[in-house]
Image (cartoon, rainbow, N blue to C red):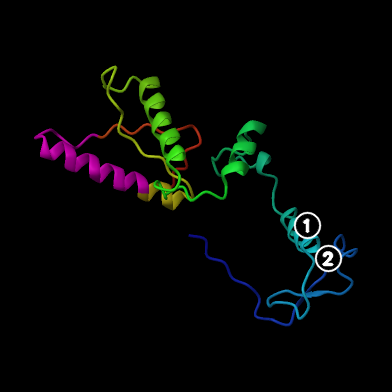
Amino acid sequence: MVISSTTADYDQNLYSTFASRYVRTSLPRFKMPDQPTPKDAAYQIINDELMLDGNPRLNLASFVTTWMEPECDKLIMSSINKNYVDMDEYPVTTELQNRCVNMIARLFHAPIGEDDTAVGVGTVGSSEAIMLAGLAFKRKWQEKRKSRGKTCHNPNIVTGSNVQVRL
Protein backbone atom coordinates (compact mmCIF):
# COMPACT_ATOMS: atom_id res chain seq x y z
CA MET A 1 0.00 0.00 0.00
CA VAL A 2 1.29 3.44 -0.87
CA ILE A 3 1.17 5.95 1.92
CA SER A 4 1.20 9.50 0.69
CA SER A 5 0.86 12.87 2.27
CA THR A 6 -0.15 16.19 0.88
CA THR A 7 0.12 19.79 1.88
CA ALA A 8 -2.59 21.09 4.20
CA ASP A 9 -3.07 24.26 2.12
CA TYR A 10 -6.43 23.48 0.55
CA ASP A 11 -6.65 26.92 -1.03
CA GLN A 12 -3.65 26.16 -3.23
CA ASN A 13 -4.30 26.50 -6.97
CA LEU A 14 -3.12 24.46 -9.92
CA TYR A 15 -1.68 26.35 -12.87
CA SER A 16 -1.40 24.51 -16.15
CA THR A 17 0.58 26.18 -18.89
CA PHE A 18 -0.33 23.80 -21.67
CA ALA A 19 -4.04 23.57 -20.87
CA SER A 20 -4.37 27.34 -21.05
CA ARG A 21 -6.21 27.15 -24.37
CA TYR A 22 -9.00 25.43 -22.44
CA VAL A 23 -8.64 26.97 -18.98
CA ARG A 24 -8.03 30.69 -18.66
CA THR A 25 -7.73 30.74 -14.85
CA SER A 26 -6.09 28.53 -12.29
CA LEU A 27 -7.99 25.60 -10.80
CA PRO A 28 -8.23 24.64 -7.13
CA ARG A 29 -5.75 21.87 -6.38
CA PHE A 30 -7.63 19.99 -3.62
CA LYS A 31 -11.32 20.66 -4.26
CA MET A 32 -13.76 20.69 -7.13
CA PRO A 33 -13.73 23.91 -9.17
CA ASP A 34 -16.82 26.12 -9.08
CA GLN A 35 -17.20 25.83 -12.86
CA PRO A 36 -16.99 22.68 -14.97
CA THR A 37 -13.64 21.91 -16.60
CA PRO A 38 -13.74 20.83 -20.25
CA LYS A 39 -12.74 17.18 -20.67
CA ASP A 40 -9.87 18.14 -23.00
CA ALA A 41 -8.49 20.47 -20.35
CA ALA A 42 -8.84 17.90 -17.56
CA TYR A 43 -6.98 15.36 -19.69
CA GLN A 44 -4.24 17.85 -20.57
CA ILE A 45 -3.75 18.95 -16.95
CA ILE A 46 -3.48 15.40 -15.61
CA ASN A 47 -1.31 14.24 -18.51
CA ASP A 48 1.05 17.20 -18.01
CA GLU A 49 1.43 16.40 -14.32
CA LEU A 50 2.05 12.71 -15.01
CA MET A 51 4.87 13.68 -17.37
CA LEU A 52 6.78 14.87 -14.29
CA ASP A 53 7.06 11.24 -13.11
CA GLY A 54 10.05 9.19 -14.12
CA ASN A 55 10.23 7.42 -17.46
CA PRO A 56 9.07 3.79 -16.89
CA ARG A 57 11.45 2.48 -19.56
CA LEU A 58 14.38 3.84 -17.57
CA ASN A 59 13.19 2.36 -14.28
CA LEU A 60 15.55 -0.46 -13.40
CA ALA A 61 14.68 -0.52 -9.71
CA SER A 62 11.11 -1.86 -9.51
CA PHE A 63 11.58 -5.10 -11.46
CA VAL A 64 8.37 -4.78 -13.43
CA THR A 65 7.78 -4.95 -17.15
CA THR A 66 7.85 -1.41 -18.49
CA TRP A 67 7.38 -2.07 -22.20
CA MET A 68 5.08 -4.33 -24.16
CA GLU A 69 4.40 -5.00 -27.79
CA PRO A 70 1.83 -2.53 -29.21
CA GLU A 71 -0.64 -5.38 -29.69
CA CYS A 72 -0.58 -6.02 -25.92
CA ASP A 73 -1.36 -2.36 -25.27
CA LYS A 74 -4.28 -2.58 -27.71
CA LEU A 75 -5.65 -5.72 -26.03
CA ILE A 76 -5.43 -4.08 -22.62
CA MET A 77 -7.24 -0.99 -23.82
CA SER A 78 -9.96 -3.02 -25.54
CA SER A 79 -10.69 -4.96 -22.34
CA ILE A 80 -9.90 -2.41 -19.63
CA ASN A 81 -13.58 -1.86 -18.85
CA LYS A 82 -14.25 -5.55 -18.13
CA ASN A 83 -14.61 -6.75 -14.57
CA TYR A 84 -12.03 -9.52 -14.62
CA VAL A 85 -13.41 -11.32 -11.56
CA ASP A 86 -17.01 -11.42 -12.85
CA MET A 87 -16.67 -14.78 -14.57
CA ASP A 88 -20.40 -15.10 -15.26
CA GLU A 89 -20.53 -11.83 -17.17
CA TYR A 90 -17.22 -12.36 -19.00
CA PRO A 91 -16.93 -16.11 -19.67
CA VAL A 92 -14.65 -15.68 -22.70
CA THR A 93 -12.12 -13.77 -20.59
CA THR A 94 -12.22 -16.62 -18.06
CA GLU A 95 -11.78 -19.19 -20.83
CA LEU A 96 -8.76 -17.30 -22.19
CA GLN A 97 -7.24 -17.24 -18.70
CA ASN A 98 -7.75 -20.98 -18.32
CA ARG A 99 -6.18 -21.66 -21.70
CA CYS A 100 -3.17 -19.52 -20.76
CA VAL A 101 -2.78 -21.43 -17.47
CA ASN A 102 -2.75 -24.70 -19.43
CA MET A 103 -0.28 -23.40 -22.01
CA ILE A 104 2.10 -22.19 -19.29
CA ALA A 105 1.75 -25.48 -17.38
CA ARG A 106 2.71 -27.46 -20.47
CA LEU A 107 5.49 -25.03 -21.36
CA PHE A 108 7.08 -25.72 -17.98
CA HIS A 109 6.38 -29.48 -18.17
CA ALA A 110 3.87 -29.62 -15.32
CA PRO A 111 3.02 -33.23 -14.40
CA ILE A 112 -0.42 -33.32 -16.06
CA GLY A 113 -1.80 -35.78 -18.55
CA GLU A 114 -2.32 -34.97 -22.21
CA ASP A 115 -6.08 -34.59 -21.73
CA ASP A 116 -5.91 -33.14 -18.20
CA THR A 117 -6.54 -29.54 -17.25
CA ALA A 118 -3.90 -27.67 -15.27
CA VAL A 119 -4.83 -25.94 -12.03
CA GLY A 120 -3.86 -22.29 -11.94
CA VAL A 121 -4.96 -18.75 -11.34
CA GLY A 122 -4.61 -15.42 -13.08
CA THR A 123 -4.45 -12.11 -11.26
CA VAL A 124 -4.72 -8.44 -12.08
CA GLY A 125 -3.84 -5.46 -9.97
CA SER A 126 -1.19 -4.48 -7.53
CA SER A 127 1.58 -6.53 -5.99
CA GLU A 128 -0.57 -7.05 -2.91
CA ALA A 129 -3.40 -8.49 -5.01
CA ILE A 130 -0.99 -10.84 -6.75
CA MET A 131 0.52 -12.01 -3.46
CA LEU A 132 -2.92 -12.53 -1.90
CA ALA A 133 -4.09 -14.50 -4.92
CA GLY A 134 -0.94 -16.62 -4.75
CA LEU A 135 -1.52 -17.27 -1.06
CA ALA A 136 -5.16 -18.22 -1.67
CA PHE A 137 -4.08 -20.53 -4.49
CA LYS A 138 -1.46 -22.14 -2.21
CA ARG A 139 -4.05 -22.75 0.53
CA LYS A 140 -6.49 -24.38 -1.90
CA TRP A 141 -3.67 -26.54 -3.27
CA GLN A 142 -2.65 -27.58 0.27
CA GLU A 143 -6.24 -28.52 1.18
CA LYS A 144 -6.61 -30.60 -1.98
CA ARG A 145 -3.30 -32.41 -1.36
CA LYS A 146 -4.17 -33.07 2.30
CA SER A 147 -7.57 -34.52 1.35
CA ARG A 148 -5.76 -36.98 -0.94
CA GLY A 149 -3.23 -37.89 1.77
CA LYS A 150 -0.34 -36.31 -0.16
CA THR A 151 2.43 -34.03 1.06
CA CYS A 152 1.71 -30.30 0.83
CA HIS A 153 5.01 -28.74 1.91
CA ASN A 154 6.66 -27.93 -1.43
CA PRO A 155 4.37 -26.16 -3.91
CA ASN A 156 5.62 -25.56 -7.42
CA ILE A 157 4.39 -22.14 -8.54
CA VAL A 158 5.12 -20.96 -12.09
CA THR A 159 5.06 -17.21 -12.74
CA GLY A 160 5.72 -14.94 -15.69
CA SER A 161 8.84 -12.84 -16.17
CA ASN A 162 6.85 -9.80 -15.11
CA VAL A 163 6.23 -11.13 -11.59
CA GLN A 164 6.56 -8.62 -8.78
CA VAL A 165 8.25 -9.94 -5.66
CA ARG A 166 8.58 -7.93 -2.49
CA LEU A 167 10.42 -9.34 0.53
Farthest left residue? 149
Classify 10 Å Cα crowding around label 2: few (below 14), some (14-19), many (20 and above). Answer: many
On the image, numbered disc 2 is attached to which residue?
A: 16
| Cα gap from disc 1 to disc 2, whole angstroms | 8 Å
Callout 1, which amino acid? Asp
Q: Nearer the viewer, residue 115 or 135?
A: 115
Where on the picture, by quarter, is residue 110? Answer: top left
**Residue in view at x 57 percent, y 67 percent:** 4
Tell me where residue 94 appears, x and y as whole percent: 42, 39
**Residue in view at x 45 percent, y 44 percent:** 90
Region rendered in magenta: 133-154
On the image, numbered disc 1 is attached to which residue?
A: 48
Tell me where residue 153 appears, x and y as whole percent: 19, 37
Does label 1 or label 2 sit earlier along the sequence?
Answer: 2
Q: How many marks?
A: 2
**Residue in view at x 80 percent, y 66 percent:** 38
Q: Nearer the viewer, residue 153 or 122?
A: 122
